Every structure is written in structure tokens, then in C-alpha cells.
Image (spheres, grey):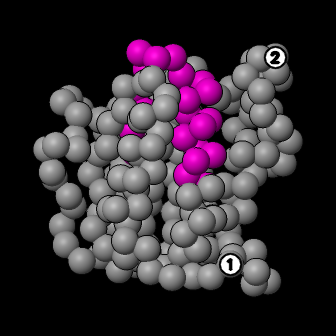
């Protein structure tokens, strides 16, 4: 393992990678899963570490949503990097917890997380993986849910966004309104 905690950087084909993670989660957690647009290209990353980070984000989304709630996954090319977003329609994050959500052992709501389990390390791992790749993770929340964005550098786009209708759910992605507000 390198000094930055990464085993080895290699080119990871983003579409195939996200589709694999998405399908695996949609098969085991009953939610309204939607795979939004995904930038085509390769990301220079430690694939296993990136998978662990995305699993933590999706586990968190599942933990704080109900089966009728939607969870969206998307990725867009930004400059020389990529933004991978996980947006859910869950309970959101209390405003007072936003500033410490990526700290080790942080709990947004101690009573609620006691029931859901976990050690409070998932989002700290996401933050560590993002930083090890030279990136960052951010979160926004409202009463409509939470929006996590994992920003990673070193992305090489190869084409326009994927629009394969077999992989897109009918309807507007949950995060579309939030995305429009930030653009």
C-alpha cells in the first residue's frame, strides 16, 4: 500500500464501474433506484478503494430511506475530473451535523443510528478515499433527503453522457433540481 493509502492507481472505466456498483445495490436493497447520466471515460483510481467509498455512500442512503424512496446515482465530467453524486429522498441530515458528518465516529442522530447499526466510520472512509485520490466529498441536505458528491481528479472523458434508456428510470432524477440550483 502506498503512503497515500492507495494500493495502486489504474484506469477504471467509469460507466462499467458505476453500473456494476448500481446493479449490485439495486439487487439487494428495495428502493426506487435510478442511474442517471454517467460521463463516459476513464478515471485514474484505486478501484477497490473507490468501490468501498461508493458502497459506504449507498449504504448510508439505504439506511436513511424507506423502500418507496428513490436513490439516484450519476456522474458528470467537470474540468479534468469527475463528480459522482448519490442523491436520496430520505430523512436528510440535521443542519448541526453537516459540519462533522465526515469525521470518524460522527453520528448525525445517535438515537436513529443505534437502531440502524454501524460504527460511524462510513463517511469518514469516503472522505479519506476522496482525499487519497486528491479529491473531496461534500454533502447538502434538505427535508427531501441528502446529496453527496464525490469529486475526483484525473478523469479522461471519451464521449458525451450516456443516455441508454434501458438504464434510466422514467421520470426526473431526484437530484435534478439540486443540480440545476448549483450549476
- The residue lying toward the viewer, choosing from 142 and 55, is 55
Q: How many marks?
A: 2
Task: Say which quarter of the image contains residue 14.
Answer: bottom left
- Please determine whether, in this image, residue 151 is positioned above or below residue 13: above
Instruction: Provide the secondary structure element on which disc 2 rests.
Output: helix
Question: Callout 2 environment at 10 Å: few (<14), some (14 to 19), or many (20+)?
Answer: few
Q: Residue at x 42, y 34 (%)?
A: 27
Q: Residue at x 55, y 33 (%)?
A: 61
Indicate which disc, 2 or 1, sits on the residue closer to the N terminus: 1
**Rendering coords of residue 109 (x, y %):** 77, 23
Task: Say which quarter of the image contains residue 140.
Answer: top right
Q: Residue at x 62, y 82 (%)?
A: 8
Is residue 65 on the magenta stretch? yes
Question: Callout 1 environment at 10 Å: few (<14), some (14 to 19), or many (20+)?
Answer: some
* Furthest-right residue in this view: 105
Q: Give the residues drawn in magenta, as a range.
A: 53-73
- Please determine whether, in this image, residue 146 is positioned above or below residue 165: above
Q: Which residue is mark 1?
A: 7
Amino acid at each position: 500500500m502506498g503512503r497515500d493509502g492507495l494500493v495502486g492507481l489504474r484506469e477504471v472505466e467509469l460507466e462499467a464501474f458505476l453500473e456494476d456498483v448500481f446493479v449490485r445495490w439495486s439487487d439487494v436493497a428495495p428502493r426506487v433506484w435510478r442511474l442517471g447520466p454517467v460521463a463516459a471515460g476513464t478515471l485514474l483510481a484505486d478501484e477497490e478503494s473507490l468501490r468501498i467509498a461508493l458502497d459506504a455512500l449507498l449504504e448510508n442512503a439505504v439506511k436513511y430511506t424507506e423502500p418507496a424512496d428513490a436513490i439516484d446515482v450519476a456522474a458528470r465530467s467537470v474540468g479534468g475530473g469527475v463528480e459522482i453524486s448519490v442523491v436520496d429522498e430520505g430523512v436528510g441530515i440535521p443542519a448541526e451535523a453537516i459540519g462533522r458528518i465526515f469525521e470518524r465516529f460522527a453520528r448525525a442522530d445517535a438515537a436513529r443510528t443505534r437502531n440502524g447499526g454501524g460504527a460511524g466510520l462510513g463517511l469518514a472512509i469516503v472522505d479519506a478515499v476522496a482525499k487519497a485520490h486528491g479529491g473531496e466529498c461534500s454533502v447538502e441536505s434538505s427535508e427531501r433527503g441528502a446529496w453527496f458528491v464525490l469529486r475526483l481528479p484525473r478523469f479522461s472523458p471519451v464521449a458525451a453522457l450516456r443516455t441508454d434508456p434501458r438504464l434510466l428510470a422514467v421520470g426526473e432524477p431526484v437530484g435534478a433540481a439540486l443540480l440545476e440550483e448549483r450549476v
